[in-house]
Amino acid sequence: MAATLRILLIEDSPGDAELIQHEVRRADLYCTFRLVDSEDGLLSALRDFQPDIVLTDHALPGFGAPEAMKILRERAPGTPVIVVTGSLGEESAVDYLKAGAADYVTKERLERLGPAVLRALDVKRGRDEQARTVRLQTATYRIARAAMSAPGVDELFPALHAIIQELMSTGTFFVALQDPETKALSFPYFVQQRDGVRIRDRRTHGRTAGKTLTGEVLRTRQPLLATPDVRRDLAAQGVLDVAGSEAVDWLGVPLAVGDRVIGVLGVESDSRDVRLGEREREVLQFISTQVAMAIERSRALAELRSSELRGKAIIDAALDAVVTMDGEGTIRSWSPQAERVFGWPASDGIGETLQATIIPARYHQAHLDGLGRFLTTGEGPILNRRIEVTGRHRDGHEIPLELTVTPVRVENAWLFSAFVRDISERKQVERRRAAQYAVTRALAEATTLAEAGRGVLQAICESLDWQWGALWILDARRDVLRCIEVWHKPDLELAEFERETRAASFARDVGLPGQVWASGQPLWQTDVTTLAGPRLPRLPHALAAGLRGALLFPIRKGSEVSGVLECFSQELRKPDADLLELAAALGSQIGQFIERQRAEDALRESETTYRSLVETSPYGIFRSTPDGRLLAVNPALVSMLGYASEAELLDRRLAADIFAAPEDRERLLDAVVMTGSVTHESVWKRKDGQKITVRQTGRVVRQPDGSVAHFTVVVEDITQHRLLEDQLRQSQKMEAVGRLAASCRFDAAAAGL
């Protein structure tokens, strides 16, 4: 059932108040009224009743609409006001509308009140939604910017906390991350606040998810809004160990990168006065992808070291334009708002037909057929309904509109009143929001730069109505931009332009991509046919393809340009400040992905190089735990000890199966723990029982808390070396004995003489 609408009625006539309430309820509104007739009554109602809309009489004794509107502007800005009065001159009506009134209705025409209330509420909802969209888009841009500027996650999380606090009121904000291998859960950021004052800052590591709310989000990979009732139900089902406090709501959403869930982003309320609901869930879920990507980038950069969304505000929705047409299709009235929407002054519009002024040519016949059918049958599919149509501005460009047409029989003739709202900005916001969603999704799902390029180009071009896109990436070795991917609408013949684009490369300040690279700023070209020479070397092919408008913007890695994204259209495109700002945010977002991708590639290359060195080393190499378990061995060690495979050797224990004298390992362990590294000779046992002499050079690797993580040891088989040394010593000993015997014989012979 729809929520109850709260309507404040400022009226001193009970009879008029009853009529007004009756007319409003005829509009099928679920509503409740409060009647006041003084300034004190209004102030009290604003505190206690908190109206959604205010209906006020023009003048009461000592109090009226002007005074009421002044109070509402100060105490309840944004609350729609409709002036309902017995009579009101044209000049006074205009003054009220200029002062911010949503509409005015005379008591002789109260049948207009219901539709006027609906329109005023629609305008308010539209403004609220646009304001919310702006906040979300601004937050998305700020998150991307924070991810680019923060040196690590310790600096990133407080920045994210500050951004989210501007979107929702929470007592607790936390980030939980799960180790992909051990599944251990850590809370690198967990802050509780009350009345804006931090009361607890807790960080924990190494926990298991267990039967917790965070664990439930990780298990289901779905958002969870856990009110006290929900927690009790989960506890009863055995999902939670404890139901938790009845006074606090808990909300968590998964942090996902592609098909991986890396953790949970969560908030809690701190009192019964601040409750979390679906709006907060939507906000948290909206930004979770950006947060996850930011965390992943910081993680990737940290691993490598150890081994802009736009915030443009959307203008408030305008009042509806009103156009009246007679049964002949001739315009009879044209409001000032219609002048603003369509560009025709009333003096030029009145007396003309709609098809001659504001209906696009392709809809002329449908308009005439529909009008004729209504005049014949009294039926029309678009009447008394809110629909979306396309209109035409005086300068020829088309406008998306929201339209409601109401027929009125006046004597023997029909009049049609059209209430028209320009929804260009809303459609534009939807397309740009769709572009941001699509780009974020493409980057999250891509595993390579080429794959991301295809997805990003298609997302931007389709969402923002560009027919061609190309991604240029900086070749640092040659110091030029090269095209790595293109996209165009399938129904366009652009093979030659694509061939030229893929074959081209641009130095700094050469061609449109080179100019963007040099300036570091977006470039908008309304008509590329005006360019020549080095500014657009591909101009002949662009002309052959029918390309006209162009937008290029830099892809940034911090303050440096790492690439350029290029878009072309077959129509002239006027510069759009909002789109340029969006382009800057998208450039930062794509640059963030490229930086993360390169960091991951570098990490993989480093790991491959290390593994190659270990695998091809002629020395045995192993890692082991303090209790003697082997964690990793290389092929040289497997061969040295006579085992068939690494897996077979990993099943052995150092003390029991490798060392000939287990106490020798204990002495070695004590020495390496005390000194950090040691070189030691020991006698080992091969698989076949043969003993060998080895020289071990070991090093201890410690955890951040100082405890021993593992030992890394390099082993050399010196059995033959020691055997040769023993043989040499034996030979030297025998030689000495021989010399002594010869000396004795000589002495004896001399004595005989």
Image (spheres, rainbow, N blue to C red):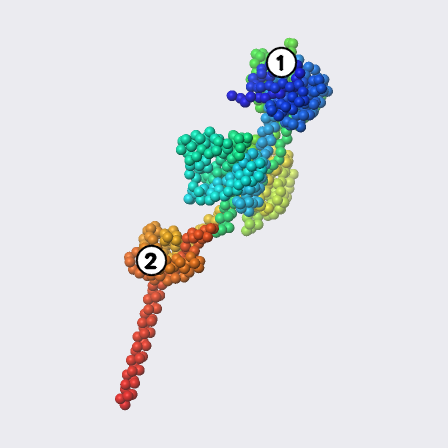
Residue 739 in percent (x, y) is at: 31, 79
* Relative horizontal placement of residue 607, taking residue 590 as reference (left or right): left
Give the camera-side residue of 28 and 718: 28
Give neighbour class at mark 2: few <14, some 14-19, many 20+ (Cα, 10 Å): some
Farthest residue to the right: give it: 91
* Quadrant location, the C terminus: bottom left
- Local secondary structure at mark 1: helix
- Residue shown at 48%/33% (left/top)? 245
What residue is rendered at 40% in x and 58% in y? 670
Q: CA distance from mark 1 to mark 2?
A: 101 Å
Q: Are marks 1 and 2 in contact (CB under 8 Å)?
A: no
Residue 89's image quarter?
top right
Q: Is residue 638 visible in this depiction of the protein?
A: no
Left or right: residue 583 versus residue 611 is right
Disc number for residue 19: 1
- Of the numbered discs 1 and 2, the one sitting upstream in the chain is 1
- Where is residue 203? Give x, y as percent: 50, 43
